[in-house]
Image (spheres, helix red, strand yellow):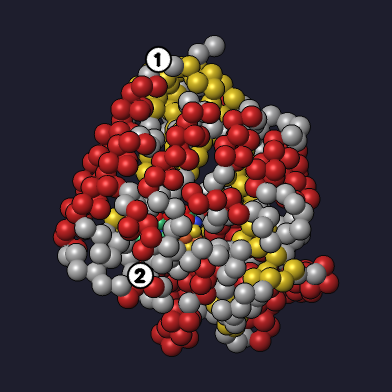
Amino acid sequence: MNTKTTVISQDELNTQFACCDKIAAHWQGIGRTPTAYVETYGCQQNEADSEKLRGYLTQSGYAIVNEAEGADVVIMNTCAIREHAEQRVFGNLGALTHTKRRHPEQKIFLCGCMAGETKVSDRIKKSYPHVDGVFSTHHLWQFPEILWNVLSRKKRQFYIEDEPGSIAEGIPQVRDNTLKAWVSIMYGCNNFCTYCIVPYVRGRERSRLPEDILAECKCVIEKGAREITLLGQNVNSYGKDLESGMDFADLLAAIAELPGDFKIRFMTSHPRDASEKLFDTMAKYDKIAKQLHLPFQSGSSRVLKAMNRHYDRETYLKKVNYAKSLMPDLVLTSDVIVGFPGETEEEFEETISLIQQVHYDSLFTFIFSPRPGTPAASMEDPTPKEEKNRRFDKLCAVQNAISEEIHLGYVGKVMPCLVDGTDKDMLTARTEGGRLVRFIGDASLIGTYQNLRITGATTWSLTGELAD
Ligand code: SAH
Ligand code: SF4
Ligand code: F3S
């Protein structure tokens, strides 16, 4: 695995823009506007990468469409986090043989985290001849060149070499949502949690320069963004690889000082690196949403050690309690894994008790999925599948009851919410903590902050009405 970082120069990017021009000219020669479909799996990092792919495609003359059928380019931006995610991609990739049969000129690409696994690219080389190109996340900045090579040489392209992790500034982006903008602040991960594939497929941690991040934030605010979500696998270690002297809390403060009516969110925070300074900064600025996604993974210190998480139950709880003491309305969410190899019934019960102690608003719950090549995949795992499923169901039931209880506590309160869309004949809005509220109102309210009185609650969402 290559551990270096490389900054892509303007000249190198210009060669990509030249390929965009060649592709656009190619389609002008044919005399029709080509179409492209990008399907995104996995986390917000992939959503952000897809916005860049759509940016490149738009610059190359493509119109972005919402389905694979009939599209001239189909890109699958994939996730490798669990086996199930990969199976879904292979299933959908197989189904594309039919769309290609009906539209033989269709060019199909697979990128994202699965493209960083040799076993995946080998399987595609051998068994998926209808796929025209595979490129790993390190090569995303070269997409125009890859597409041009496919169009002009009529040959499959595999850009999967283990390159240094790249930082490329200035790739055009077509954002999905003008109200809510994703802004990547760093790429990769150094943590090597023993169950996780991300460090192997996304490379080492590398931070964008603060000035580039601030410029992007200013730009999205000027274009109407009301929420900015800062992205990284471990945002709390932002800046460690730079000489700017700016850590994540400093970066948050600098963004919060920008003029405009917006809120800042961020994910994901690793508990080891979440500092008191971070919580102090969150508490200080109104523009930083009082919402924290702080994955704990397990309530057992022994399991946390086996996971290589570098914190224990006590330090985790201490940090959460400190954050809550500063921000009583803090909305807390987390990720948790059930059935890590060797997890005993008692250790699972420690997870349950931690959930009850912290009282999360909601949880992302996962059953351990062995990822080939990671240390946990070869750990002894005597617990039967049925037993893991039982633990998982119990965990979900405990959490659902807590979520419902917290949501019922909102009923009667008036909360400022960002109106962000529609759902059937109702409008949707988000509380500052990110909770979904449905209410009746005029579509002209979309994009504004409104005070909503909460009138009803379920485990998953709230209903409300305009308070003023
Ligand atoms: N960087 C983030 C998480 C990224 S992956 C962090 O460290 O918190 C999102 C979640 O997927 C993880 O928090 C973990 O709960 C889950 N996950 C990762 N690998 C997994 C695996 N092999 N099996 C089951 N869940 C996994
Ligand atoms: Fe995976 Fe751990 Fe990195 Fe998160 S911090 S991406 S769980 S290795
Ligand atoms: Fe999946 Fe890659 Fe994100 S493995 S969760 S898409 S970083």
Which quadrant: the N terminus? bottom right
Q: Is residue 203 left or right of 152 when viewed as pictured?
A: left
User: Which element type, helix, strand or loop, lies under badge 2?
Assistant: helix
Can you see residue 139?
A: no
Q: Quadrant of ligand 1?
A: bottom left
How far from the left and from the top, in percent, is residue 338?
Answer: 29, 55
In front here: 101 or 49? 49
Residue under pointer 2:
376
Mark 2 crowd level (few <14, some 14–19, many ≥20, 10 Å Cα): many
Q: Residue at x 66, y 74 (%)?
A: 4
Q: Is residue 164 visible?
A: yes
Residue 447 coordinates in the image, percent (x, y)? 61, 31
Amino acid of disc 1: Gly
In the rendered image, the vertical position of residue 148 relative to residue 283, given as above or below: below
Q: Quadrant of residue 97?
A: bottom left
Q: Which residue is the site of mark 1?
A: 412
Disc 2/disc 1 C-alpha distance (Å): 47 Å
Viewer-nearest residue: 151 or 374: 374
Q: Residue furthest top?
A: 468
Residue drawn where x is 58% and y is 75% of the image: 135
Mark 2: amino acid: Ala
Of labels 2 and 1, earlier in sequence is 2
* Residue that appears at 33% across and 36% down: 357
